[in-house]
Structures are given as structure tokens and as C-alpha cells.
């Protein structure tokens, strides 16, 4: 009888190539996603040392961070140039590096182009029980389908390209169990914002978080990807949700997913991965789903979460002196006074998109709120950015694009967009944005930009009223 | 990578907690295809203040940075480590780090020292006027007073830093083991190869 193991331990054990005497392990990497921003130096390193890519078949490259979300082709179908020379140079480097090293490349103008973390699951390239890495911290996202997935630095990108492995130390395990049913208007995004508020931005540091409980099981794959995506905002390099029938139904038939007899063998294997009864975690947190309200951030750390019905907290309300100092700095940056009702905070910008919330279900949720309504006059800029070309096509087939544009929102091309201020989509200094992205850091959406993280439905509600709004009031 | 053993000098008494990598190096500095010159963008939003610590006469070019809990959280950008290195920082001292940042730091010859908050508080005090001494071989942080703080570090990371090791060359010695793993994987779970 073997020791009961967690989902994380099973995936880890299945990927150990070698264990060194000091507990560092050489771990095999099953899937590698590459984008334009964190790869050029890695490819340059390979070239300088005369190395090749060990397993190009396990690697996909797709540009997402820098691509403008305005049209990429002219009326005649010719590629439009990218105005920013630095972005253009990074995109050109990826376009050159991928074929030179034999890697599959999805061009910015291809129908399946999109944000790496949307493309991976959508293509069936990301699979349960695999190890997945990418030079991007939101790689944690793929944990939503039961993959051990985490962000890596550029030196590690080069290491994986050259050897298809990484030298890693095992993480500790943490369970975040969300039991019960969430109320109306409460989405996967509210669940993960609430969790981040409870455990703190460093609550999962050194750990891999497995999300369990009936509220997690009840989520669609899209919702699970949203939850796991923000594991990193709670300090955990990776999140995990055990694969189940919901996962299998989502993956079946996708281009890179196993087919025929292979599919049956894969499902049998995936079913064996769930955490064994009696397995223990190093740390556990239990959350009652009924306690989760539509949530919003007030500060500049993703742990700065309150229910939309709440108020801006006073720095002195925190016990920890360093948190008091951080909160005071945050409020100064955010231009907020303690005691202000969150629902009284006006917003001038709306961003619906990012690897957290740009899948079809997110767009449907936002469209359901905004349908038949119009954005408020004080909302100057409101964009909807689908996560991939395939999400965009699906949304257009459902007429969602018209719902957004009729309401005065812009319908864009896929990419990371206003999540990270690397492409033309930025929030002006001093202005607020109700954003479905994952980070409210200082300057994240542009120098001086003030970010309030919310769900897609909450972003749509804010677009309609021009201030942070309890979406439940628009759901009559 | 430059080997690292003893580092002594001024330590920037920065002290903030949850310092994210967007603060260490904002995204627009990532639009480059090289690793060089990142120091100019390091802590850009903080250095917009002419009285900032980083550019002060006492701390410009200081080799040590003292920070609060969860240093380097957020983005996986290795540019954060490149930016610190380009500023001249060889050691960061904090109560905790994001997992990705601490790995990136080591790969760039920067030592992330973990010490409890009480030690950080004391070092912050000393650092305002006096230098700090870091000894990786003996795993200590000391001052010219009686302070002596021991820190833990994973032996593999310690070896990499002391010897300035290139991890890829090290892993290439395991080529046969990787090949054997791949062969076994193809036998056990052939469906793991992408179908298309």
C-alpha cells in the first residue's frame, strides 16, 4: 500500500527524471508555451552557445503581450505594420526564432492566435497531469484543467528549450477548499479575489494551491482557469484543480488532445490523479461560498479586496504595521479616502479581457449585464478584448460583439491588451479602470493608472453606471 | 555568471513589503531583446521622486538591498533580476520572496537572503549609517556592531552562486537520463505527445 498522495505529488512524482542528493529534482516538462517578450534573450542564448531546441514538438510560440488589439490586416488582407518599433522588433524576433528552431508558430494574424493561456487549453495542447511552463507568471492558469503549470524566468525558458527539463525543488502543498453554493452575481473571479483577500498576497508562497470543494467542482473549465490563473496573486507559483468529467468534456475533440483509443487511455490516467483519501496538505484554508460577494480591489495589491457593498478601509484598521504603511501608500496612489463606499467610486475606463477573464463564458456574462443598456457618459474608454481569435469568432456568432458595440464599448482583436501596459492599450495617469485583469499593481495598466479588479459582469455593470457597482442591482 | 561569496557595503534600507516586479521594472522596459541596461528602468516610479533612496549620495550603487515580505511578487519577468544586477545589487535581504523571483535572482548571481522581520528591522536601522557584511560561505549577515544573523539557503543554490554555475551545462550532463525518461514516457503514455 503506497502512501496517500495529493494531486500535486502525483504529477510531481511522474515527472522526476533525476533526484539530486540535496532534494533538487530534474523535472520533465511536457508543454512549453513561448511568447515574444520573455523569449528573445533565451533564443539568443541558445544561438550563442550553439544549442538547439530538444523537443520542438512540445513547444508552441504565439505573440500576445505586445500585439496591438486594433485590426491587423488591411481591407485587402495585407498585414498592417506595428507602429511601436520596439514591439515590432520583439514580434519580428519571435517570427524568426520559432521557425529557425523548428517550433510551431501561431502568427498574430492567424485565426487561433490569442493569449498563450487561452490558446493552450483551447487547442487541447494543455492537458491534465502534464507539466506546463511559460515565461509568464499567469501560467498558473492551466492548473484549472489539472496541469502542474507555472511561470518561469527567461534563463529557465532557455533551460527548457535546451533540455526539456527544469531543476526544481518540490513545493509545499496547500488546500483551499470552497464549500457550498455561491450567490447570484458571484463568479469564479469573485471566488479567487475573495480567496486572495483571505490568504494574502504571500499566503501561498512556497506552495502549490489545490482548489477543492463543491463551489470549485461546480465551476466550468473557464471558471476554473480564472481561479487557478490568480493562484500567483496569492503567492503560489501554481494552482491545481483535479480533472473531472467537466474537464474531459471540455478537452474532447480539441486539436492537440488525444484521439480514439488514446483518448480513453488518457481519461483513465487523468481519473487516477485526484488527491487520495487520507492525503494531507501542508496548509489548509476553508472558505464558505456563501460568504463570497461580488468583490473589488481598493488598493495596489491583489490582497486588497472588499465586497462591493464595503468601504475603503482605513490603514490603521490593519494589525500589521508594514501593512498599515503599504495601505496608506496604496490609498494615496489610488486617490481614495478611508470610509468611502466602493459603490461611490467613479470609473472612466473599462477593460474586459486578459488571461483571467477573456473566454467565451466571461464575454457572455458581461454581455448579459450590458444588453439593452449603454455605457455611462463619464466612461471615456471601454474595450472588450477576446482572449483568442476563436473566442472572438464564437462571440461574434452569438452576436455578443453587437451587444457590446451597441452599448458603446469597443470590440477588439485578441491579445493581452490593457492588462499590462506593453501595447497601445493603456489607462491614463490618475484615471480609474474597472478591469477584469489580475493585477492592480502601481503602474500596471500604465504609469499612474488606478486599477480596480472585478469580474466581467461587474466590469459591465460599472460601464453602465460609470462607477463601481453591485452587479446584483442590475440583475433584477 | 559572476561567482558570489562575500559582499560588503552600503545596504539600501528600502523595507517595503509586497514589492512587485512591475515596481522593480515596469513593463515598458521589457520591450527589448537583450538583457542589458535595465538598471535605468529599475524602480522607475519611485525614482521619479528626486529624493529617492536609490539615487541618494549614500546608496547609489549600493550592493545590498533590504526589503519587506514577499519581495518580487507578481510577474515572472527575469528583467527584475537583470535590473537589480545592473543597479549593482548583489544581495537582497528580506523576510520572504516570491518563488519565481528568488529563482531568477540566483540564476543571475544575486543572493536572496531570508531573515526574520526582527533582523530586518535591526539591519534597516544599521544600514542608514553603516555598511552591512554578507558571507555566503558561512551563511551570515553581520554589522560592525555585535549583530550576527545566520540564514538558511538551499545547498544547490548556494553551490550555483559560489561557483557561478551555468545550470544548462549542468543539466546537459543528465542527457542520458532525460533520454531514458522520454523513451519510458512514450511507452507508458504515448498519448502525451501533442496529437496534431
Image (cartoon, rainbow, N blue to C red):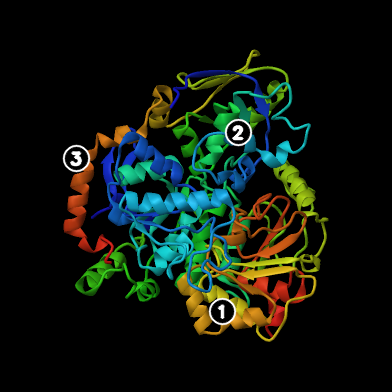
Q: Please tell me which residue is depicted at 68% across the width and 32% down the height of the picture.
A: B14
Label 3 crowding class (10 Å Cα cut-off): few <14, some 14-19, many 20+?
few
Gap between marks 3 and 1 measured at Cα: 50 Å
CB under 8 Å between discs 2 and 1: no
Q: Is residue B141 left or right of residue A224?
A: right
Snapshot quadrant of residue A407: bottom right
Q: A321 or A440, which lies in front?
A: A440
Q: Identify the residue under disc 3.
A: B176
In the displayed structure, would residue B148 be above or below residue A297?
above
Do the residues indicated by labels 2 and 1 lie within the same chain of the protein?
Answer: no
In the displayed structure, would residue A366 be above or below residue A432?
below
Find residue A364 and name its label. Answer: 1
Q: Position of residue A339 (x, y in %)?
A: 82, 59
| Label 3 secondary element | helix
Q: Position of residue A231 (x, y in %)?
A: 52, 56
| Label 2 secondary element | helix
Find residue B39 and name its label. Answer: 2
Label 1 crowding class (10 Å Cα cut-off): few <14, some 14-19, many 20+?
some
Q: Please tell me which residue is depicted at 31% across the width and 32% down the height of the picture.
A: B169
**Chain containing the residue with disc 3:** B
Amino acid at each position: 500500500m503506497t502512501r496517500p498522495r495529493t494531486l500535486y505529488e502525483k504529477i510531481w512524482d511522474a515527472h522526476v527524471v533525476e533526484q539530486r542528493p540535496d532534494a533538487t529534482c530534474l523535472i520533465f516538462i511536457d508543454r512549453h508555451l513561448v511568447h515574444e517578450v520573455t523569449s528573445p534573450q533565451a533564443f539568443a542564448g541558445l544561438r550563442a552557445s550553439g544549442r538547439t531546441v530538444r523537443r520542438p514538438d512540445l513547444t508552441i510560440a504565439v505573440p500576445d503581450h505586445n500585439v496591438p488589439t486594433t485590426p491587423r490586416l488591411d481591407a485587402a488582407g495585407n498585414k498592417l505594420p506595428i507602429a511601436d518599433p520596439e514591439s515590432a522588433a520583439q514580434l519580428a524576433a519571435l517570427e524568426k526564432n520559432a521557425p529557425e528552431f523548428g517550433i510551431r508558430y501561431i502568427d498574430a494574424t492567424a485565426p487561433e492566435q490569442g493569449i498563450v493561456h487561452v490558446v493552450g487549453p483551447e487547442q487541447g495542447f494543455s492537458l491534465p497531469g502534464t507539466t506546463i511552463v511559460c515565461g509568464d507568471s499567469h501560467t498558473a492558469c492551466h492548473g484549472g484543467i489539472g496541469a502542474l503549470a507555472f511561470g518561469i524566468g527567461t534563463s529557465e525558458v532557455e533551460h527548457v528549450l535546451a533540455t526539456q527539463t527544469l531543476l526544481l525543488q518540490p513545493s509545499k502543498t496547500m488546500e483551499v477548499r470552497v464549500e457550498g453554493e455561491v450567490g447570484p452575481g458571484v463568479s469564479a473571479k469573485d471566488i479567487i479575489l475573495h480567496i486572495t483577500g483571505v490568504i494574502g498576497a504571500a499566503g501561498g508562497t512556497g506552495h502549490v494551491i489545490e482548489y477543492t470543494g463543491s463551489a470549485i467542482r461546480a465551476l466550468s473549465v473557464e471558471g476554473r482557469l480564472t481561479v487557478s490563473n490568480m493562484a500567483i496573486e496569492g503567492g503560489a507559483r501554481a494552482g491545481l484543480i483535479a480533472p473531472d468529467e467537466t474537464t474531459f468534456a471540455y478537452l474532447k475533440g480539441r486539436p492537440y488532445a488525444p484521439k480514439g483509443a488514446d483518448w480513453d487511455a488518457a481519461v483513465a490516467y487523468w481519473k487516477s490523479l485526484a488527491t487520495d483519501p487520507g492525503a494531507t496538505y501542508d496548509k489548509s484554508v476553508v472558505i464558505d461560498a456563501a460568504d463570497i460577494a461580488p468583490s473589488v480591489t481598493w488598493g495596489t495589491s491583489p490582497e486588497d479586496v472588499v465586497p462591493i457593498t464595503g468601504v475603503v478601509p482605513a490603514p490603521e484598521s490593519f494589525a500589521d504595521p508594514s501593512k498599515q504603511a503599504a495601505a496608506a501608500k496604496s490609498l494615496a496612489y489610488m486617490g481614495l479616502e478611508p470610509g468611502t463606499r466602493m459603490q461611490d467610486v467613479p470609473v472612466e475606463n473599462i477593460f474586459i479581457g486578459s488571461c483571467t477573464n477573456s473566454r467565451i463564458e466571461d464575454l457572455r456574462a458581461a454581455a448579459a449585464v450590458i444588453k439593452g443598456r449603454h455605457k455611462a457618459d463619464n466612461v471615456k474608454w471601454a474595450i472588450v478584448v477576446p482572449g483568442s481569435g476563436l473566442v472572438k469568432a464564437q462571440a461574434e456568432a452569438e452576436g455578443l460583439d453587437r451587444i457590446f458595440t451597441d452599448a458603446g464599448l469597443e470590440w477588439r482583436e485578441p491579445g493581452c491588451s490593457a492588462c499590462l501596459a506593453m501595447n497601445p492599450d493603456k489607462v491614463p495617469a490618475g484615471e480609474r479602470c474597472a478591469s477584469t485583469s489580475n493585477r492592480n499593481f502601481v503602474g500596471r495598466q500604465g504609469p499612474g493608472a488606478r486599477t480596480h479588479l472585478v469580474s466581467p459582469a461587474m466590469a459591465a455593470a460599472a460601464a453602465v453606471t460609470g462607477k463601481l457597482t453591485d452587479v446584483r442591482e442590475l440583475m433584477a | 555568471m559572476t561567482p558570489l561569496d562575500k559582499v560588503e557595503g552600503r545596504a539600501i534600507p528600502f523595507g517595503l513589503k509586497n514589492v512587485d516586479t512591475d515596481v522593480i521594472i515596469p513593463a515598458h522596459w521589457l520591450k527589448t531583446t537583450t538583457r542589458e541596461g535595465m538598471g535605468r528602468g529599475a524602480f522607475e516610479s519611485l525614482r521619479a521622486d528626486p529624493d529617492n533612496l536609490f539615487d541618494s549620495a549614500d546608496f547609489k550603487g549600493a550592493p545590498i538591498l533590504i526589503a519587506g515580505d514577499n519581495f518580487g511578487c507578481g510577474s515572472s519577468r527575469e528583467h527584475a533580476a537583470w535590473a537589480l544586477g545592473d543597479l549593482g545589487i548583489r544581495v537582497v535581504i528580506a523576510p520572504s520572496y516570491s518563488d519565481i523571483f528568488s529563482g531568477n535572482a540566483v540564476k543571475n548571481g544575486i543572493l536572496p537572503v531570508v531573515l526574520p522581520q526582527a533582523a530586518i528591522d535591526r539591519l534597516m536601522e544599521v544600514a542608514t549609517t553603516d555598511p552591512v557584511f554578507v558571507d555566503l560561505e558561512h551563511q551570515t549577515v553581520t554589522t560592525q556592531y555585535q549583530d550576527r544573523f545566520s540564514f538558511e539557503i538551499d545547498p544547490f543554490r548556494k553551490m550555483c552562486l559560489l561557483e557561478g554555475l551555468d545550470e544548462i551545462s549542468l543539466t546537459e550532463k543528465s542527457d542520458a537520463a532525460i533520454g531514458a525518461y522520454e523513451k519510458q514516457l512514450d511507452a507508458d503514455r504515448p498519448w502525451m505527445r501533442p496529437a496534431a
